[in-house]
Amino acid sequence: ILADEPIASLDPASSRKVMNTLDRVNREDNVTVIVSLHQVDYAKDYCKRTIAMRDGEVVFDGPSSELTPQFLQELYGEHSSELFADGAAKAAEPVTRPIAEKDLAVATS
């Protein structure tokens, strides 16, 4: 499945439903899911692997857990803190189960 910004413009509850559905399809049906997101917090919560691009070039390809604030500052500049919903209320609740070992990837730009 290739999902191009499937949670763009959705409220947090709907965003979680969509991401949970994609995750379930990945785990239960053994289907590879590639998701294009701008919400880094969702990438870190739902995806085992992230591919980040800048100006058409891959600048990161690795575990989502390795997306550090320092790297995001370099990638997005001074506004990198806006990529996380931690400000007022976190949009994506933490995932309470381990991420599946199957192919679930995210490309952020």
Image (cartoon, rainbow, N blue to C red):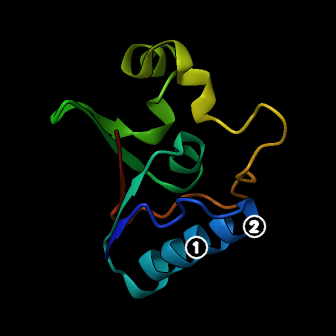
Q: CA distance from mark 1 to mark 2?
A: 9 Å
Q: Residue furthest bottom?
A: 29
Give the residue at x 70% y 39%: 85
The residue tagged 2 is: 13
Callout 1: SS? helix
> What residue is drawn where x is 62% and y is 29%?
82
Percent coordinates x, y for residue 21 in the rendering: 56, 78
Residue at horizontal 43 percent and vertical 76 percent from the top:
26
| Disc 1 target residue | 18
Nearest the eye: 40 or 99: 40
Q: Bin the neighbour count of mark 1 within 10 Å (Cα to Cα): few under 14, some 14-19, many 20 and up.
A: some
Q: Which quadrant of the figure contains the N terminus?
A: bottom left
SS at badge 2: helix
21 horizontally vs 88: left or right: left
Which of the pair 1/99 is nearer the observer? Answer: 1
**Residue 73, x across and y down, in percent:** 47, 15
Estimate how packed mark 2 is, as few (under 14), some (14 to 19) or many (20 or more) residues with alpha carbons within 10 Å. Answer: few
Which three-letter amino acid code belongs to the residue tagged 2?
A: Ala
Which of the numbered marks, if any, corresponds to residue 50?
none
**First reached walking from the N terminus: tag 1 or tag 2:** 2
Residue extending furthest right? Answer: 88
Q: What type is the residue that disc 1 sits on?
A: Val
* Residue 58 point in image, percent of width and height: 19, 34
